[in-house]
Image: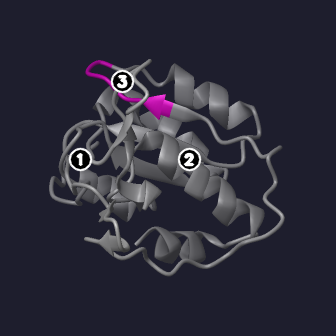
Amino acid sequence: MMKFTLVVHTSNINTFQSPNHGSLGVLTNERVQFHHHPYRQIAFRDIDEQLRVPLIKAYMGMESDLFEFYAQQNIDGLVVEALGQGNLPMTCLSGLKQCLDKGIPIVLVSRSFNGIVSPVYAYEGGGAALFDDGVIFSNGLNGPKARLKLLVGLSQHMTHQQLKEYFE
């Protein structure tokens, strides 16, 4: 259930919470009462922690240089926390396309606490255009969790299509 869990405080011992989904359950005198049942997950072995998967937070007016840098660094994948429903400033797209042209899988999540990324806007830098360019959309995960999931997928040598399905 870590998918819905967030660190909400830097030092409180009750820091792990699930603001949008509530508690997993309660412990009574007699048993554990689950409100939500854990998902069945696929177990993967041999996670390659040496893979290079940076996480970038997008911002208005963001230039292309950070993406250009990563395109030259032979990274294995990239996660981008996008604006709103999955949009990026046009000023950063040339570098993003360099990454895509090199075959670097790019996973897009939203910077927003609530909501999902969605291929809605078709302007250059909009979610629909990014989706058409091959950017992988991930919903329900924040940036750090999407990064870990991409690391797992890459460790299993998933193709771009397999990664896309893995994140759906």
Q: Count of labels shown?
A: 3
Q: Which mark is residue 9?
A: 3
14 or 132: nearer the viewer: 14
From the image, tell me which residue sits under label 1: 126
Residue 142, position as x, y percentages in the image: 39, 45
Q: Residue at x 22, y 57 (%)?
A: 21
Q: Is residue 35 left or right of residue 109?
A: left
- Which element is circle 3 on? loop
Q: Amino acid at mark 1?
A: Gly
Which corner quadrant of the image does residue 70 belong to? top right
Task: Give the number of the mark in front: 3 or 1.
Answer: 3
The quadrant the C terminus occupies is: bottom left
Q: Amino acid at mark 3?
A: His
Please tell me which of labels 1 and 2 falls first in the chain. 1
Above or below for 83 versus 149: above
Residue 30, position as x, y percentages in the image: 35, 73
Label 3 environment density (alpha carbons within 10 Å; few <14, some 14–19, many ≥20): few
Please tell me which of labels 3 and 2 falls first in the chain. 3
Q: Verify whether residue 59 appears in magenta.
A: yes
Q: Which mark is residue 147?
A: 2
Q: Amino acid at mark 2?
A: Arg
Q: Which residues are magenta?
A: 56-61
Dominant SS of magenta comes to loop
Q: Verify whether residue 55 appears in magenta.
A: no
Label 3 to label 1, Cα distance in Å?
A: 33 Å
